[in-house]
Image (tube, helix red, strand yellow):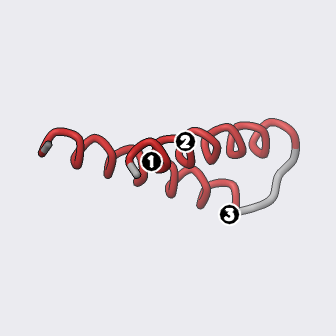
Amino acid sequence: MSNLLYTIAVILVILWALGFFVYSAGSLIHLLLVIAVIAILFRLIKGRGI
């Protein structure tokens, strides 16, 4: 499950970067970045507990 979260976070960061540099889609791109950061933080916090 944690690998899935990490994969989703990486994909969201890549999509954010592409959207940021290729075209401007408003707040949707920044929402993707926030979701990716939350997923990475969740994985780090959950990984330390194990």
- Crowding around mark 3 (Cα neighbors within 10 Å: few <14, some 14 to 19, many 20+) is few
Residue 3 x %, y %: 44, 42
Q: Amino acid at mark 2?
A: Thr
In this rendering, the label closer to the viewer, 1 or 3 = 1
* Camera-nearest residue between 2 and 43: 2
Q: Residues within 10 Å of mark 1 (few under 14, many from 20)?
A: some
Q: Nearer the viewer, residue 26 or 35?
A: 35
Q: Residue at x 42, y 52 (%)?
A: 39
Q: CA distance from mark 1 to mark 3?
A: 15 Å
Name the element at disc 1.
helix
Relative placement, left or right, of 38 versus 8 is: left
| Residue at 55%, 42% in the rendered image | 7
Q: Amino acid at mark 3?
A: Ser
* x, y percent for residue 30: 62, 55
The residue labelled by disc 1 is: 37
In the rendered image, residue 38, in percent from the top left (x then y), is placed at 40, 54
Which residue is labeled 3 in the image? 27
- Vertical relation: 33 (above or below) 7: below
Query: For residue 10, which quarter of the picture?
Result: top right
The kind of residue on which mark 1 rests is Val
Mark with earlier residue (1, 3)? 3
Q: Would you name the residue on which mark 2 appears?
A: 7
Name the residue rendered at 78%, 38% in the picture: 18
Q: Secondary structure at mark 3?
A: helix
Judged left or right of residue 10, residue 28 is right
Q: Earlier in the sequence, mark 3 or mark 2?
A: 2
Q: Is residue 44 above or below residue 39?
A: above
Whether label 3 touches label 2, CB < 8 Å: no
User: How far is the residue under mark 2 from the one under mark 1?
Assistant: 12 Å
Q: Residues within 10 Å of mark 2 (few under 14, many from 20)?
A: some
Identify the secondary structure beneath mark 2.
helix
